[in-house]
Image (cartoon, helix red, strand yellow):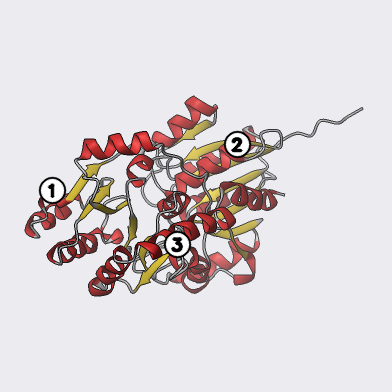
Amino acid sequence: MEITKTPVRILHVTFNMGFGGTEQVIRQLVTNLDKDRFHNEIACIDGEVGAIGQALETECGIKHHARQRASGFDIKTILWLRQLIKSGKFDIVHCHQYSPYAYGWFAHWGTGAKVVFTEHGRFHPDHHRKKARFINPFIARTSHKLVAISSATRDALVEYEYFPRDRISVIYNGIAPLEVTEKKRSALKDQLGIKAEETVIGTVARLDAVKNQALMLKATRTLLDQDVPVRLLLVGDGPERDNLEKLAAELNLGESVIFTGFQSEPADYLSLMDIFLLPSFTEGTSMTLLEAMSLGIPTVATRVGGTPEIVADGETGKLVESDDLPAFTRAIQELLQDPNALSRMSQHARRRFEERFSAKQMVEQYEHCYE
């Protein structure tokens, strides 16, 4: 008689399930983990479930729980999580980002559940926290698994958060490859007024100071002054949008820059780009960078955080130092002046993605964490 094994029950604890890299990783996990072996639910401690969470619940039946934590360290949120863990009989509490980890770690005591923590990125500039020196080594030793999404993120956890290096595994983010039809691309180009002979450079990201989109605007001005026919495509919205639009006006970019605002299907816009730009001051493992690579789009990026672990400099794109406008502009120009190099990097980018950053590879590694 065959014995049916009960699926491992996992509660993912996060801030919310809006749009962002952490949310994308959780989506990849809950939709790609073997349903016969793993049962997933999500707990949001910032009240709002968010668009990705709502889609997962509607389309995939992934159950969500949400509570708005109070300011400071909210004991009631710990008790709420603890009750969820006990009533849901969860085996694993997978905490995404540090604050959800703190809540999940306190809540798991006495429930029989194991804690897994994934650090998805760091602040800029990063800083030491005195309390962490005393707390984090202990909670690390009493957690089942600790994960960083890049070696750079692991280094930051060791240096700034005092986590023991030997307890931290590196699991790179992974995604399902994007697919966009030529018909869609052509229609979208017509809609945006992009001419066939124009080269499109750009990014898909939250318009935030840490992403340094201002550098793209300045580089575009320099390229246009050198008679390079480029269009800059900025896909996304955020707190810096007004400032960036003002800067674009000051630089007299006119129709050479397109602000699309928030797009629920950003892959279509990403597919229009000949070069993907990532001038951030800090990054963990950029999900949009992986999406660009899956489409075979070469990248010009800053050498920060986990980006050098993803972009093979000179092979899948070019890396420059942070906030270096001349170097950033020159890297774009060199690629545009060498179509053969651009084509070669396109092929290498897609191959590197398939070999290292697929959702399948990421999910398999997390399955081992849950064992």
The x, y position of residue 172, in whole percent, is: 54, 58
Of the numbered discs 1 and 2, the one sitting upstream in the chain is 2
Give the residue displayed 54% in from the left and 40% down from the top.
81
- Tell me how far mark 2 sits from mark 3, CA to CA: 41 Å
Q: Quadrant of residue 338?
A: bottom left
- Tell me how far mark 1 sits from mark 2, CA to CA: 46 Å
The x, y position of residue 198, in whole percent, is: 23, 51
Of the numbered discs 1 and 3, the one sitting upstream in the chain is 1
Task: Work out whether residue 143 can be spotted.
Answer: no
**Secondary structure state at the residue bearing disc 1:** helix
Task: Say which residue label 2 marks.
Answer: 40
Give the residue displayed 47% in from the left and 50% down from the top.
294
Numbered mark located on residue 236 in the image: none
Q: Nearer the viewer, residue 143 or 257?
A: 257
- Tell me how far mark 1 sits from mark 3, CA to CA: 30 Å
Task: Say which residue label 1 marks.
Answer: 255
Q: Residues within 10 Å of mark 3 (few under 14, many from 20)?
A: some
Q: Residues within 10 Å of mark 2 (few under 14, many from 20)?
A: many
Comparing labels 1 and 2, the label whose residue is closer to the camera? 1
Residue 263 horizontal side relative to residue 242, left or right: right
